[in-house]
Each structure stands twice: as C-alpha cells, then as structure tokens.
Image: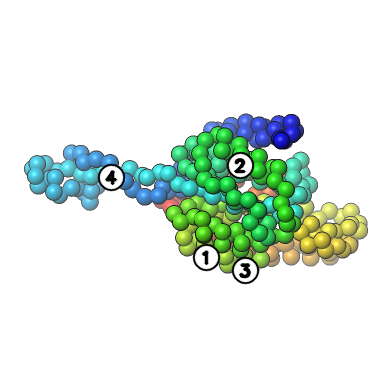
Amino acid sequence: MISKELLRKIRGIEIRTRHLVTDVLAGQYHSAFKGAGMEFEEVREYQPGDDIRSIDWNVTARTGHPFIKTFREERELTVLLVVDMSASLHFGSESQLKQEIVAEIAALLALAAIRNQDNVALLLHTDQVERYIPAGKGSRHVLRVVREILSFDPASKGTDLRPAITFLNRVTHRKSVVFLIGDGQLEASSLEAARLTARRHDVISIRLEDPRESEWQAVGLIDWLDPETGEYGLIDTASPRVRKALREQHQIWTTEQDQTLRRGGIDSVSISTSEAYERTLARFFRIRAKRRGQ
C-alpha cells in the first residue's frame, strides 16, 4: 500500500520532471542518442543537393531519370536505468537526500526516453541485484520506476556493480543505452565490469556528489560512520591539515574514476546535489551530440 506522503512525492517528481523535459531537455536527448539503425523509407526523384551516394542505380537505369533511396532512423531504443540503492545514498547536506535526487534524475531520463518512443527498463542494485523491471512505455510505467526507487527497501547496504552488470548482459541482448546512476562508490573490479559492458552497449555514468563529501566544515570532532560497511571513527575537522587531506583524497579518487571510465569508452557526468541537475544533463547531452556530429 502506497502511503499518502510517498504518493505526493511521486506526483511532485512527475510534475517537476515533465516540466523539465519540455522546457530544458527538448531535443537534447534525441540528438545525443542515435536510434538502433537506419530503415529504408522510399525511392524518390533526385533533387539538387541530394547525396549522390544515395542514388538507386537500378531504378535510375529503368526510368532514365536519377532516383535516390531515402532512409529514416529506426528510433526505438531500450534505455536501462541501473540505479545504485546502497546505504550511501541515504545522505544529503542540502534540501534533499541523494536517493530523492536520483529518483528525479531517473524520472527525467525516463520521460525523455518515452517522449522519443523509446523503452525504459529499471535495474536496482546494491552489492547484488535487488529488483528488475522489464522495459516498458508510457507515463504509468515511468511512475512505477519512480515509485520503486523511492520506496524500495534493499536487502543489502553495500555497493558492487558486478552482479548488476552480469544480470544486465544476460537479459539485454539488443544494444541499449545504459545509465549507471549513483554516487560513484565503485571499486576497480566494478569499473572493469562497466568497461566490458560498454563494448556491447552505450554506457553513461551519472555520479551524484554532495559538497560536504569534498569540502569538510571546521566543526571539531565528528563521529564518522560508513553506512555501507558500518565502519566507525572520529574525524578532527578543526584541523586544516585533516580537511586538506580529505579534500585531496576525494579529488584523487574522482580523477581516477573518471580516467578509468574514459579509457573504457564510457561517458560520465558528475552532478552536485547543490546544483540544478537538469542544466548539467542538458549541457552534457549538447556536448555529446556535438561530439558525435549530430
């Protein structure tokens, strides 16, 4: 049974993301992702400016006039949202938890996909596959995707992308667009699994970051608890040396992740919880479309 509070959240996300798809992402998504291929449409008479490589020589020889073949993009894609549900997403120093922002990003991508007649599937994971929703279309399907992300109670707290990747490769036979959405807490083995998947699919990593993960405030001794492992410790944030070390450690980790993804042919975009994620995604789509010569 869905609680009234959860229902309000879901409807609020739907209203907000529909508005964003219309006002911010219109056309950007379509340009950034190519369809599954080209499908023959018709043969028509050659017109000045047409590509001569498209001339249908058989029809041209038969009629005595130049004709060309025209094709249209076979648009329908399968978009797979692979969403990290580990305990590290239950954090947020801004107005929302990471988990809530992840749900909004997933909803935004799902709405952009179905507006372009693409299918959307959802795979929730921690260090194991938690839930899989097969590809579907329509606003009701998108609402189900958002509901699952917001309400799902995972069995595990850890993070390991490998089981999700293994499952993905087993159930997805056709080339798909795969969004890896989470806070980027990936080990080297998980990154390697993602790189292998990128050989078959178009993989994009969306990493959500909170400003407090890189810029610690000087508030003295604080209790630190890793939500995934349960590891506990004390951090002296009053020490400039400690804050600098934490900042540098985070920067090194982020750089290494980005370099590994790039070497594996995986596009990545980092989104801060303190910024308008729709603007960051729109900019990423524009750059991606331009790079691909769209």
Query: Which marked residue is nearer to the observer: mark 1 or mark 2?
Result: 2
Give me the disc on residue 189. Answer: 3
Query: Which tag, 3 or 4, sits closer to the chain's start?
Result: 4
Q: Nearer the viewer, residue 223 or 79?
A: 79
Q: Tell me where residue 87 sits by quadrant.
A: bottom right
Q: Quick check: can you spot residue 49?
A: no
Label 1 to label 2, Cα distance in Å? 26 Å
Secondary structure beneath dot 2 equals: helix
Instruction: Name the residue: 72% across, 48% down.
Output: 153
> What's the amino acid at mark 2?
Val
In this figure, which residue is indicated by the disc labeled 1?
Answer: 196
Secondary structure beneath dot 1 equals: helix
Query: Which marked residue is nearer to the observer: mark 2 or mark 4?
Result: 2
Q: Position of residue 89 (x, y in %)?
A: 73, 51
> What's the amino acid at mark 4?
Phe
Label 3 to label 4, Cα distance in Å? 42 Å
Q: Position of residue 28 (x, y in %)?
A: 49, 42
In this figure, which residue is indicated by the disc labeled 4?
Answer: 40
Q: Residues within 10 Å of mark 3 (few under 14, many from 20)?
A: few
Secondary structure beneath dot 4 equals: strand
Query: Which tag, 3 or 2, sits closer to the chain's start?
Result: 2
